[in-house]
Image (cartoon, grey):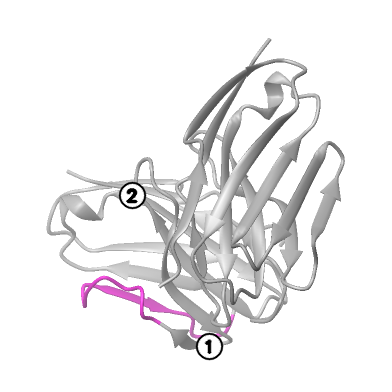
């Protein structure tokens, strides 16, 4: 596609529920990143994929968070047993490779846990 | 861990002024640095990307400089317009693939 697409744009869920957030990167971009942005803060790294594999998942806060990219394009960020502290904007970005290029970000998914 | 600081946190200027946003980082061993713009409730729009071997990049009214040895970058906006009002984020990338972001400078340009 022309840009990075994230769905849904907004998600409200009850505490304890499971959610999935989807990212569709720019076609041909092998590198995909998930970030989380809390109110008034800069984005914080969660996980980086190169192709189908998670090359760096050091930013995932705990084992309730998991992400997949089974075919090397679309990625899904999965959050189990959501907590109110998980409320944030989840941003996805892609780049042509994992090398020196810049990122292109999607518009994000605003997750609210009530 | 790389720490990125942006000063000022907020800035309000009258239309037409030239302004400078500052970004500093603690580890000078960076791969590149990218400036982004974020409008309220929106994602990030890339403005300028500076590789570690470069000193500056220009796009229209925007000019970004990089002094790697001192751990600083500046974003210069010439002849500011109300449409420039947004939050500006600086992000630094080391040899790994994650960017480290500052908390941003919230800019308001008053007509």
Residue at screen point 75% across, 50% down: B64
- Segment colored magenta: A57-72
- Where, by quadrant of the figure, is residue B28 drawn? bottom right
- Tag 2 subunit: A
Please say if the residues under marks 2 and 1 sit with CB atoms less than 8 Å apart: no
Cα distance between the residues tagged 2 and 1: 26 Å
| SS state under label 1 | loop
Residue drawn where x is 36% and y is 73% of the image: A59
Instruction: Judge the density around disc 1: few (<14), some (14-19), many (≥20) Cα neighbours within 10 Å.
Output: some
Between A69 and A48, the one nearer to me in the picture:
A48
Residue labelled with disc 1:
A52
Instruction: Indicate whether residue A52 is drawn in magenta.
Output: no
Disc ID at residue A88: 2
Q: Residue placed at 80% from the left, 24% from the top?
A: B79
Q: Looking at the image, is B97 positioned above or below residue B7?
A: below
The numbered mark, 2 or 1, whose residue comes first in the sequence reads 1
Q: Which of B94 and B65 is in front in this view?
A: B65
Left or right: where does residue B85 sit relative to residue A82? right
Instruction: Compare residues B106 and A73 and report the one nearer the observer.
Output: B106
Q: In this view, does A73 lie above or below B103?
A: below
Counting from the top left corner in percent of width and height, residue B30 is at 61, 73
Tell me the quarter of the image containing the N terminus of chain A.
bottom right
Residue A68 at x, y percent in the picture: 42, 80
């Amino acid at each position: 596609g022309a840009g990075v697409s994230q769905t849904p744009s907004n998600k409200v869920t009850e505490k304890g529920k499971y959610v999935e957030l989807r990212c569709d990167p720019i076609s041909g971009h092998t590198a995909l990143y998930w970030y989380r942005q809390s109110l008034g803060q800069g984005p914080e790294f969660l996980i980086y994929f190169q192709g189908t594999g998670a090359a760096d998942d050091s930013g995932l806060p705990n084992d309730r968070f998991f992400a997949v990219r089974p075919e090397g394009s679309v990625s899904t960020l999965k959050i189990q047993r959501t907590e109110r502290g998980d409320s944030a904007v989840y941003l996805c970005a892609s780049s042509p490779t994992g090398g020196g290029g810049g990122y292109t970000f999607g518009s994000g998914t605003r997750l609210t846990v009530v | 861990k790389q720490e990125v600081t942006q000063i000022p946190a907020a800035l309000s200027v009258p239309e037409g002024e030239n302004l400078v946003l500052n970004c500093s980082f603690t580890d000078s061993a960076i791969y590149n640095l990218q400036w982004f713009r974020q409008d309220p409730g929106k994602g990030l729009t890339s403005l300028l990307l500076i590789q570690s071997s470069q000193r500056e990049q220009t796009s229209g009214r925007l000019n970004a400089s990089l002094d790697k040895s001192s751990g600083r970058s500046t974003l210069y906006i010439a002849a500011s317009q109300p449409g420039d009002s947004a939050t500006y984020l600086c992000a630094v990338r080391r040899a790994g693939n994650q960017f480290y972001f500052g908390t941003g400078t919230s800019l308001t340009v008053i007509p």
